[in-house]
């Protein structure tokens, strides 16, 4: 998988099945992501978004299929594959006893970069983290935890940034700044971003691709043109997604 | 009251969820392997009891003080552990918002602890009764009943003390963590800067790397200090290296067991980072190992000074200390979120290995080494694959 990899392809997922124990939550997932892509991952609660991201980031063992990140096979060379993505942690997984700065130092020391080595911008400053950085993460609100998780995920400028519902808890200013950062990363042509979200209206304006999961399978995909077509008026894209989910098992016949 | 069985229900659900999350193959291994090992251990104990029946029946101190004291102590130990477990569930984060008073939460924990304690006391009573039956001790059922009373007594005393000492964790927990780290407190920064930085502070739950002095910490440090000084003094007075060397190994290993924490190995922060299991494990073992070696040096130095010709003894003690610490670090990495279970499993494995090695010689050590390698492999697989 690694030897014949397309250099622009940052994520290659082939026939992935993953779940907990022997029960598959997602199955038959094929996905290819290139530098410059911003993928919106949509789906109802329990549709398998987080399970898919856990399998891609090596947190659960795939039941079948392969994952390669920046040409490195996740099963064969996990450390090399993991050095190519930054995952914004779930707020509950952050080490509550450390201060924000210590957490950034911890992640930076693992990635072998400086604690302020962000791609192009000072993320802590842009997200309004400065006044919280010396305080314990245990004291942070949900939104501030999301900010420090995003700031840590961007350390070392990894080619693939993965945000699992991380934008949901941000205040409007931080959410706006984060969108600008994501767009700047993608337009640089060196990074790709996966955003798992329930805020469907944010997808057409931010992402150039979208993918809808239902019952653990890809129910529908949109490319940049289809996304533009599906969002001429406010609420259009949301209607598209709802139609895809409501039409009885329409996606299974595809 | 209607909430009384809530903690018990929570624990039961957790057990079921844990069993369901395990793969059938792993479960079969645990049931078949554990069952076979248990059957072998029971058979072995029965044979040993029968062999020493006459002696055991005649040792009066055993029946007057030894067995009753052990049963009472065991009950106290179990009572404290179970009460702590039940209290932690009664004050679980998702129950904090419920309008339950401190008294109601204590009652929920007490009901659960008592319900769990009854079958354990029955097992202890059956074991003692059967043991007395095997060695043909008169009134074996009475001994079994007495064992249940003694175990239950210790259990109740410890559980009540633990439940009474429970503060209102709903209001104090976050305040404890949020305590101002800017105050002048001993700082671990100088020792915790090697890569990955701040890993030990995280593992020990030290707010921003600051050590919070407490009576428990001071008491433990004083105990270990006095033990080291006493053993060193005994060795120097008697010109005998053994007491100090033994104290060095035992104390050094206890320091390691008390300070080793490996729960970050289960966190996505490390598991999704480009950091191998061995590197993370070594880094988490580093500071506890430094503490352990620092403790070992005083008694070992005294042993060498007391009997310079027996220089091999402190050297061998140091090697044993490293081997024991390494083995325990593997157990602690496997049971990463339950250091108490890790310590209990390790001590049980060591005790069983020592006992069997009396019969089968050093070959049993190979079995222990195989167990350590197996646990290492499982911990590594879980770190890598979930």
Image (cartoon, helix red, strand yellow):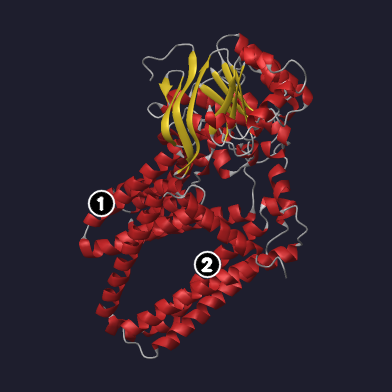
Q: Is residue B331 above or below residue B269?
A: below
Q: Please identify the quarter of the rendering in which residue A22 is found.
A: top left
Number of other residues with Cα within 10 Å of mark 2, as a class: few under 14, some 14 to 19, many 20 or more: some
* Visible residue check, residue B370: yes
Dots 1 and 2 on the same chain: yes
- Residue B155, image x and y in percent? 56, 72
Looking at this view, name the residue that lies furthest to the top: A188
Q: Chain of mark 2?
A: B
Label 2: state its secondary structure: helix
The tag on residue B77 is: 2
Sequence-first tag of 1 and 2 = 2
The residue closer to the viewer here, A153 or B28, is B28
Q: Residue furthest bottom?
A: B138
Q: Quadrant of residue B247?
A: bottom left
Q: Residue at x 36, y 58 (%)?
A: B349
Depicted B9 relative to depicted A160: above or below: below
Image point (67%, 66%), residue name: B108
* B305 vs B333, nearest the viewer: B333
Q: Position of residue B317 (x, y in %)?
A: 33, 50
Secondary element at tag 1: helix
Q: Residue at x 45, y 75 (%)?
A: B124
> Which mark identifies residue B195?
none
Between A146 and B309, the one lying in front of the other is A146
Please identify the quarter of the rendering in which residue B355 is found: bottom left
Q: Which residue is mark 1?
A: B366
Parent chain of label 1: B
Whole-angstrom CA distance, mark 1 to mark 2, is 31 Å
Q: Is residue B362 left or right of residue B20?
A: left
Residue B192 visible in the shown view = no
């Amino acid at each position: 998988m690694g030897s014949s990899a397309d250099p622009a392809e940052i994520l290659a997922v082939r026939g992935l099945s993953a779940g907990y124990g022997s029960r598959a939550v997602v199955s038959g997932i094929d996905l290819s992501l290139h530098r410059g892509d911003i993928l919106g991952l949509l789906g109802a609660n329990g549709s398998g978004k987080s399970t898919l991201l856990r399998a891609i980031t090596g947190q659960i063992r795939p039941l079948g299929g392969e994952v390669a990140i920046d040409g490195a096979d996740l099963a064969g060379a996990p450390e090399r594959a993991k050095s190519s993505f930054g995952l914004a942690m779930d707020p509950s997984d952050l080490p509550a006893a450390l201060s924000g700065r210590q957490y950034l130092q911890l992640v930076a020391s693992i990635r072998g970069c400086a604690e302020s080595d962000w791609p192009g911008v000072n993320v802590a400053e842009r997200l309004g983290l400065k006044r919280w950085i010396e305080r314990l993460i245990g004291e942070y609100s949900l939104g501030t935890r999301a900010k420090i998780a995003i700031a840590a995920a961007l350390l070392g400028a990894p080619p693939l940034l993965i945000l699992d519902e991380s934008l949901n808890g941000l205040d409007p200013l931080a959410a706006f700044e984060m969108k600008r950062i994501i767009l700047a990363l993608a337009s640089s042509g060196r990074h790709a971003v996966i955003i798992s979200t329930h805020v469907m209206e944010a997808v057409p304006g931010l992402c150039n691709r979208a993918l809808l999961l239902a019952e653990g399978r890809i129910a529908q995909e949109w490319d940049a043109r289809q996304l533009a077509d599906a969002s001429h008026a406010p609420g259009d894209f949301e209607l598209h997604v709802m139609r895809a989910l409501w039409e009885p098992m329409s996606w299974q016949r595809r | 009251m209607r909430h009384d069985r809530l903690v018990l229900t929570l624990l039961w659900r957790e057990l079921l969820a844990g069993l369901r999350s395990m793969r059938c193959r792993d479960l079969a291994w645990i049931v078949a392997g554990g069952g076979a090992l248990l059957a072998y251990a029971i058979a072995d104990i029965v044979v040993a009891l029968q062999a020493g029946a006459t002696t055991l029946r005649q040792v009066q101190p055993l029946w007057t003080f030894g067995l009753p004291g052990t049963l009472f102590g065991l009950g106290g130990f179990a009572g404290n552990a179970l009460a702590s477990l039940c209290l932690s569930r009664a004050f679980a984060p998702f129950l904090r918002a419920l309008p339950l008073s401190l008294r109601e939460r204590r009652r929920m924990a007490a009901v659960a602890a008592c319900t769990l304690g009854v079958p354990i006391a029955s097992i202890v009573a059956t074991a003692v009764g059967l043991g007395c039956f095997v060695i043909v001790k008169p009134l074996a059922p009475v001994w079994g009943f007495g064992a249940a009373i003694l175990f239950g007594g210790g259990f109740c005393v410890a559980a009540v003390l633990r439940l009474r000492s429970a503060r209102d964790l709903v209001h104090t927990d976050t305040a404890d963590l949020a305590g101002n780290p800017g105050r002048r407190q001993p700082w671990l920064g100088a020792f915790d800067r090697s890569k990955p930085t701040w890993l030990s502070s995280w593992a020990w739950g030290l707010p921003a790397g600051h050590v919070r002095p407490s009576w428990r910490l001071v008491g433990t440090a004083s105990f270990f200090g006095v033990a080291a000084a006493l053993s060193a003094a005994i060795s120097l007075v008697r010109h005998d290296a053994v007491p100090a060397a033994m104290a060095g190994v035992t104390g050094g290993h206890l320091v390691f067991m008390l300070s080793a924490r490996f729960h970050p190995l289960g966190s996505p922060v490390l598991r999704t980072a480009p950091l191998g299991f061995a590197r993370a494990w070594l880094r988490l073992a580093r500071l506890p190992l430094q503490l352990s070696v620092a403790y070992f040096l005083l008694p070992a130095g005294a042993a060498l000074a007391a009997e310079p010709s027996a220089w091999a003894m402190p050297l061998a003690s140091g090697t044993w200390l490293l081997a024991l610490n390494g083995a325990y670090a593997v157990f602690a990495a496997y049971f990463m979120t339950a250091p108490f279970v890790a310590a209990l499993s390790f001590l049980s494995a060591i005790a069983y290995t020592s006992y069997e090695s009396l019969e089968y010689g050093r070959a049993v050590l190979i079995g222990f080494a195989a167990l350590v390698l197996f646990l290492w492999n499982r911990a590594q697989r879980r770190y890598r694959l979930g």
